[in-house]
Image (tube, rainbow, N blue to C red):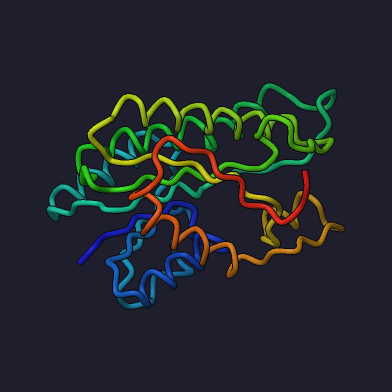
Amino acid sequence: MKTILVSGTSSGIGYEICLKALKLKYKVISVSRNSKPLENIKGIDCYSVDITDNDQLNNLVESLKSKKINIDFLINNAGHLKNETFDKTSYESFKETYDVNVFGLAQITRLLLPIINKSGHVINISSIGGVNGSKKFPGLSVYSSSKAAVIALTEVLAEEFPNGPSFNVLALGAVQTKMLKKAFPEYVAQTNPNEMASYILDFALNGGKLFNGKLISVSNSTP
């Protein structure tokens, strides 16, 4: 049985990915600060972990190692989004966002690497806002810049681990999640979490065979 670990699973895309992977008979490991939404679903192993807390991450990895778990697919979906113009942005806002979107993502990946199979696939979730040449929206200087960092990190990791696992990054367009609704109450996205989760899971399971170190924009809007 293949094993998939997903971060940021309390709602939205991560939540839907876990349910879909379970239906496909994969061993599903959910990692989220709020583990309650998936805790009562048989077949999903839930870990309440804040990926910005190094001690909690170390405990997670030690627990997985003690159970002799090897990971085939890692989907780094956890994210933080806040809408504020640059002149109103504080150091704390930058730190909070980067702690989740960049440093937490990097740390959980680094700690899990010893138990990720060489034939495995690591998917980092970025944003179309972090892609060069894409339309940038006011209020997202912190978020978009953090997601650009995720893209660069993914490309470097693919070079540093030529023997596997594969590393790819998906730059998502707007998805109608709670996080988006909180940041932009009036905006209605054309894509729902269920649709995006289907694409991400399919790419995670199959894309590593043909792609490595690649940035793929997943957006139905232009540019």
Residue 113 position within the rendered picture, expressed as x and y whole percent measured from the top left: 26, 37
Q: Say which residue appears at 57% left-offset and 30% top-offset.
A: 98
From the viewer's perspective, tell me whether residue 177 is left or right of residue 158: right
Quarter placement of the N terminus? bottom left
From the viewer's perspective, tell me whether residue 51 is left or right of residue 136: left
Residue 67 position within the rendered picture, expressed as x and y whole percent measured from the top left: 14, 55
Query: Where is 157 relative to 31, above or below?
Result: above
The one nearer the camera, 137 or 95, is 137
Q: Say which residue appears at 29% left-offset and 68% top-offset.
A: 26
Quarter placement of the C terminus? top right
The one nearer the camera, 27 or 204, is 204
* Label total for image: 0
Q: Say which residue appears at 81% left-offset and 62% top-offset.
A: 188
The one nearer the camera, 199 or 137, is 199
Residue 135 position within the rendered picture, expressed as x and y whole percent measured from the top left: 79, 38
From the viewer's perspective, tell me whether residue 62 is left or right of residue 89: left
Determine the image quadrant of residue 187.
Answer: bottom right
Query: Where is 98 relative to 200, above or below?
Result: above
From the viewer's perspective, tell me whether residue 54 is left or right of residue 2: right
Q: Say which residue appears at 37% left-offset and 45% top-offset.
A: 122
Determine the image quadrant of residue 21.
Answer: bottom left
Residue 216 position within the rendered picture, expressed as x and y whole percent measured from the top left: 55, 44
